[in-house]
């Protein structure tokens, strides 16, 4: 069997040190003078405007004024618009027999949460709530992302087992080695007959908060994750366990395929096993993002333009950055895909309301953790396995949200400055971060010579676009929006609203429109390109990957989940995995 003995090269590839891999005396591996080798700049990427910083005349305005100058009026205008967007008046007929008008047969519901996981992998910033008091253009105070520029599941792995040991599992009681990701057992209620068939690890790992100087709560209040945002809702935390199972199953498979070589220390061997398993997971993940997720959510011609070895990017600037138009507006399209309820398994008679899905986590319901079997997902109901199971289709992408999404503001909150609902918050994010106006960005992209803008009637004739937006606002905003509101919004539509409207107008909500697709493609495919040459050992990893996963590329979520079930022993379990 092929031996992987070039430890120094492998560690350089993964940018980890032994101190980062092994659990030292300090939780972050710094007590003995070792610092993580990942460049700090890579984890402090600038969040800046697409192409360049727009001039004041090119920025989004409300009646010709910067929205930050009139925060009260801006909040109220967007509150009314968000209420109009909670009405299901966008769709008048279903796309397929047997579906509701708002259901999208082309995108099963699991992709809503895969897109959310990818978003967490690309951007992590402190912009939790809109802030009208900060000028993001100040040279000494730019917005920063704490994520790697690469699409490398940094949101799952972090800087490695030494830097974040609480996210990893000990291999045994003797060693401090942690090659597997830590997972938690599900909670059994009611039916005990199938207990013996149920594998222990079907939830993320959670723990109680120890006594200290903070307020104490009952239950498992802390998810032991690199990125606690991945416990944002039960569907997302369940999806995260799929990648955890895949990694942990690969650790066992890699160890079997590449046994410890003569003269190799146990520490060195475990580092190699971990590194190889992670690299395989990353490659599978990137294949799925490129060939499955992006293919489903992007305009087909935009996807074809970028899904090639050396795509022609519109924003050609060097350096690590993520567009504000992506993170604070366009990529919020996933919120419109959230269903009002979900069926978790084919043997469950009931469904889970989205409000409960969003509240079922360690932050909101720690007393009800870990998840019991009613929340454990049977994945063919969330992804396309071509098996005839009735799916949970996502909502069509458009300026319309599930009416019972949990409000952002806490029950009983009195502050008038807090967003009233999820759509309201998305609108405010764009208004407080100095985004391009839609019309100005379309003009700037056209000046770059991109052939893609011409694919869109909305982008090619913005006068027509204003008329169409005004018509929609009159219809959906009846009794909510005034004539003045409609004129203001149609003249300079908020970026996140336009992206949703464009998707509805250009594709009946089946995928994003041209401008939304360009912003997403530029961001995601640049991250994919940055990841493509990360190892320098592609032949070695490819051969190992082929021996474990076979020669057929793993290009979609159904194939990823099928391999995961085999590697992790989840093919015949209760609750069902597949």
Image (cartoon, rainbow, N blue to C red):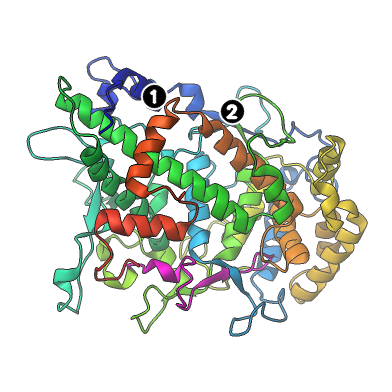
Say which element carries label 1: loop
**Quadrant in the rendering for residue 529:** top right
Residue 399 inside the magenta-drawn segment: yes
For the image, the number of numbered tags is 2
Q: Main secondary structure of the magenta part?
A: loop
Of residues 188 and 296, the one nearer the viewer is 296
Q: Is residue 188 left or right of residue 150?
A: left
Q: What mark, if any, has residue 320 been given in the picture?
A: 2
**Counting residues from the N terminus, which is met first, the one under dot 1 or under dot 2?**
1
Magenta-colored span:
376-400
Residue 481 inside the magenta-drawn segment: no
Q: What mark, if any, has residue 15 been given in the picture?
A: 1
List x then y, in percent, for residue 575: 27, 71
List x then y, in percent, for residue 110: 48, 63
Of residues 354 and 526, the one nearer the viewer is 526
Q: Is residue 11 left or right of residue 328?
A: left
Residue 217 shows in this picture? no
The residue furthest top is 33
Query: 42 above or below 234?
Result: above
């Amino acid at each position: 069997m092929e031996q992987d003995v070039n430890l120094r090269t492998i560690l350089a590839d993964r940018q980890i040190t032994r101190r980062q891999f092994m659990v030292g005396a300090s939780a972050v591996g710094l007590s003995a003078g070792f610092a993580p080798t990942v460049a700090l700049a890579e984890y402090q990427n600038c969040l800046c405007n697409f192409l360049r910083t727009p001039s004041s005349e090119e920025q989004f305005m409300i009646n010709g004024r910067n929205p930050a100058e009139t925060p009260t009026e801006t909040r109220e205008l967007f509150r009314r618009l968000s209420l109009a967007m909670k009405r299901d008046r966008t769709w008048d007929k279903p796309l397929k027999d047997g579906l509701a008008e708002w259901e999208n047969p082309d995108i099963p519901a699991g992709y809503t949460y895969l897109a959310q996981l990818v978003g967490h992998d690309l951007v992590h910033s402190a912009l939790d709530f809109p802030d009208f008091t900060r000028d993001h253009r100040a040279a000494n105070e730019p917005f920063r992302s704490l994520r790697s520029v690469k699409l490398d599941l940094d949101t799952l792995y972090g800087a490695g087992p030494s830097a974040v040991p609480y996210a990893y599992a000990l291999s045994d009681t003797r060693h401090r080695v942690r090659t597997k990701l830590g997972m938690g057992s599900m909670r059994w209620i009611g039916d005990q007959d199938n207990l013996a068939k149920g594998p222990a690890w079907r939830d993320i790992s959670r723990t109680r908060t120890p006594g200290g100087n903070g307020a104490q709560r009952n239950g498992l209040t802390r998810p032991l994750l690199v990125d606690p945002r991945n416990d944002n809702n039960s569907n997302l935390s369940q999806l995260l366990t799929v990648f955890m199972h895949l990694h942990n199953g690969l650790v066992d498979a890699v160890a079997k395929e590449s046994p410890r070589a003569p003269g190799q220390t146990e520490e060195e061997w475990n580092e190699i096993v971990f590194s190889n398993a992670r690299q395989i997971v990353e490659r599978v993940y990137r294949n799925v993002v490129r060939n499955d997720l992006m293919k489903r959510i992007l305009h087909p011609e935009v996807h074809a333009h970028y899904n090639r070895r050396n795509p022609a990017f519109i924003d050609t600037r060097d350096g690590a950055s993520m567009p504000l138009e992506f993170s604070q507006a366009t990529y919020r399209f996933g919120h419109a895909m959230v269903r009002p309820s979900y069926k978790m398994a084919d043997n469950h008679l009931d469904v889970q309301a989205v409000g409960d899905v969003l509240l079922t986590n360690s932050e909101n319901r720690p007393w009800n953790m870990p998840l019991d079997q009613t929340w454990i997902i049977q994945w063919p109901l969330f992804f396309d396995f071509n098996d005839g199971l009735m799916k949970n289709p996502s909502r069509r992408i458009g300026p319309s949200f599930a009416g019972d999404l949990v409000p952002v503001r806490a029950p009983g909150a009195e502050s008038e400055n807090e967003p009233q609902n999820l759509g309201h918050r998305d609108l405010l994010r764009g208004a407080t971060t100095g985004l391009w106006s839609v019309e100005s960005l379309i003009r700037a992209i056209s000046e770059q010579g991109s052939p893609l803008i011409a694919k869109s009637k909305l982008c090619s004739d913005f006068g027509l676009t204003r008329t169409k937006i005004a018509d929609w606002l009159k219809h959906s905003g009846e009794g909510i929006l005034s004539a003045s509101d409609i004129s203001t919004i149609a003249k300079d539509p908020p970026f996140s609203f336009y992206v949703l409207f464009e998707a509805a107008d250009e594709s009946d909500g089946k995928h994003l429109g041209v401008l939304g697709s360009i912003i997403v493609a530029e961001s995601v495919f640049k991250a994919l390109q940055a990841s493509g040459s990360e190892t320098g050992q592609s032949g070695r990893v490819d051969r190992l990957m082929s021996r474990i996963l076979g020669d057929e590329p793993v290009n979609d979520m159904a194939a990823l989940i099928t391999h995961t079930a085999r590697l992790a022993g989840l093919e015949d379990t209760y609750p069902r995995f597949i």
